[in-house]
Image (cartoon, rainbow, N blue to C red):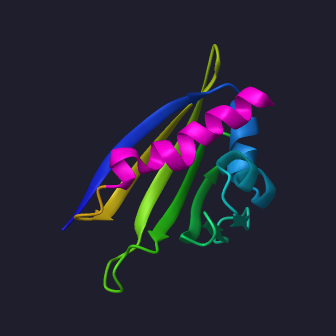
């Protein structure tokens, strides 16, 4: 059985800037602090956090939405890929970023219980606050 969850956070940059960083090797690496390689096209492959995460881009709706398959080094060989839907919503202080992570293998609770916050939202907030 798999499960789904949602996490969100605020960053102090406009949606286009956050979207562009998410979909670029240089930007993704800079905003998270982990090495990333991103082919910024539908069907393009990506990896992040020094190849701990990898997948394929399924949908791009610049600058509002990205859907990607998502698989970490923790997944068992027989686990299906999970999926992330990332939305970027403009507001008065920048962008509200929401990640809907679905088809996560049961027992892999670390992504929901601080993993996204520690590996994405906290470094993104620091990165965009400094730029």
Task: Write the residue at 29% across / 56% down.
Answer: 109
Task: Write the residue at 37% across / 75% down.
Answer: 75
**Rendering quarter of residue 11:** top right
Task: Write the residue at 54% across / 39% down.
Answer: 121
Viewer-side residue, 84 vs 121: 121
61 to the left or right of 107: right
**Rendering quarter of residue 76:** bottom left
Looking at the image, can residue 64 be seen? Answer: no
Looking at the image, can residue 130 be seen? Answer: yes
Q: Is residue 65 magenta?
A: no
Q: Is residue 118 magenta?
A: yes
Magenta stretch bounds? 110-131
Task: Give how far across and how far down residue 25 sits, in percent.
Answer: 76, 60
Q: Is residue 113 above or below residue 131?
A: below
> Quick one: which residue is furthest to the bottom in this view?
77
Task: Give how far across and how far down residue 111 sits, in percent.
Answer: 38, 54
99 to the left or right of 106: right
Task: Write the residue at 48% across / 66% down.
Answer: 70
Task: Give how far across and how far down residue 69 sits, in percent.
Answer: 49, 66
Q: Is residue 104 above or below residue 112?
A: below
Viewer-side residue, 113 vs 106: 113
């Amino acid at each position: 059985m798999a499960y789904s969850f949602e996490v969100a956070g605020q960053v102090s940059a406009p949606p286009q800037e956050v979207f562009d960083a998410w979909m670029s090797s240089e930007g993704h690496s800079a905003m998270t602090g982990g090495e990333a390689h991103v082919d910024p096209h539908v069907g393009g492959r990506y990896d992040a956090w020094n190849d701990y995460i990898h997948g394929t881009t399924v949908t791009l709706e610049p600058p509002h939405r990205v859907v990607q398959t998502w698989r970490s080094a923790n997944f068992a060989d027989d686990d299906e890929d999970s999926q992330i839907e990332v939305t970027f919503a403009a507001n008065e202080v920048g962008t509200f970023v929401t990640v809907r992570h679905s088809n996560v293998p049961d027992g892999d609770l670390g992504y929901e219980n601080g993993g996204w916050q520690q590996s994405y939202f906290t470094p993104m907030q620091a990165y965009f606050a400094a730029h």
